[in-house]
Amino acid sequence: MSAKEKKDKKSEKHIAQLQEQIEQLTVEKQDLFEKLQRLSADYANYQKRVPRQVADTVAYEKKKIIRALLPSLDNFEHALAGASAAEGPEALENVIKGIQLVFDHLLAALQALGVQKAASLGQPFDPMRHEAMMQRSEPDQDNGVVLEEYQPCYLLGGEVLRPAKVIVNKLPEPEAPRPQEARPEDTEPAAKANCDLESQPEDETVETEPEDQ
């Protein structure tokens, strides 16, 4: 076999390898393209599905809350009907009982949803849970404690849903002690001692003549 034939055969083999690689790359490209199309379709469906799921979840939670509060509305109707049917003190008593029943049921419904009522009276003032409306001084109470509560604090999952509006105890700060003033009788001995020292005569020095030798 001549050198030219060997070279041609080697070229044909190389071309065949390149052709095989091209076919393999073409198959991989097509596979990746199909995967990309599927991902694009899934993402488009996801974009359409998520808002619908969020809306369904919000609607479900709304229905859940409304169902929990409807019995309180029924209790209002029963309380008003009982007050209308009664007369005199009995009517007022029925109204009070109806209001208490509605309050208890509303509180229970909120607790079932994770809402908790936090105690504030007698507790140290916490700026995260309390909103100070004013200050008052009561010496028999500790400084900085809540004396009155206008509006209670409610928590949801341990986080403050609404802070309480309170009155806080503020005791006056103790006055700093004044420096003690010197009394006249305290200064007299010192002044007298100074005068005695000044009145004493100075030591006289006597000059002596040197003796004759």
Image (cartoon, grey):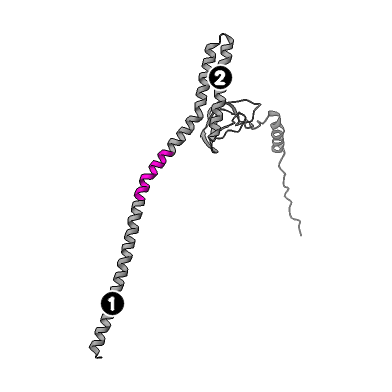
- The percent position of residue 200, horizontal first and vertical second, equals 72, 38
Judge by depth and name the residue closer to the eye, 86 or 130.
86
Q: Is residue 28 above or below residue 149?
A: below
Q: Tell me, for residue 98, which label it has, or none.
A: 2
Residue lying at 32% horizontally and 66% vertically, measured from the top left? 27
Judge by depth and name the residue closer to the eye, 211 or 31.
31
Q: What element carries label 2?
A: helix
Q: In which quarter of the image is the N terminus?
A: bottom left
How packed mark 2 is, by other alpha carbons closer than 10 Å (few <14, some 14-19, many 20 or more), is many
Mark 2 residue type = Gly
User: What segment carries the magenta color?
Assistant: 43-56
Q: Is residue 9 above or below residue 52?
A: below
Does the segment drawn in magenta span residue 47?
yes
Judge by depth and name the residue closer to the eye, 150 or 194.
150
Q: In which quarter of the image is the C terminus?
A: bottom right
Q: Tell me, for residue 210, which label it has, or none.
A: none
Mark 1 residue type = Ala
Residues marked 2 and 1 touching at CB (< 8 Å):
no
Residue lying at 29% horizontally and 75% vertically, measured from the top left? 18
Q: Is mark 1 on a helix, strand or loop?
A: helix
How packed mark 1 is, by other alpha carbons closer than 10 Å (few <14, some 14-19, many 20 or more), is few
- The percent position of residue 46, horizontal first and vertical second, equals 37, 48
Q: Which mark sits nearer the N-terminus, 2 or 1?
A: 1
Q: Tell me, for residue 16, which label it has, or none.
A: 1
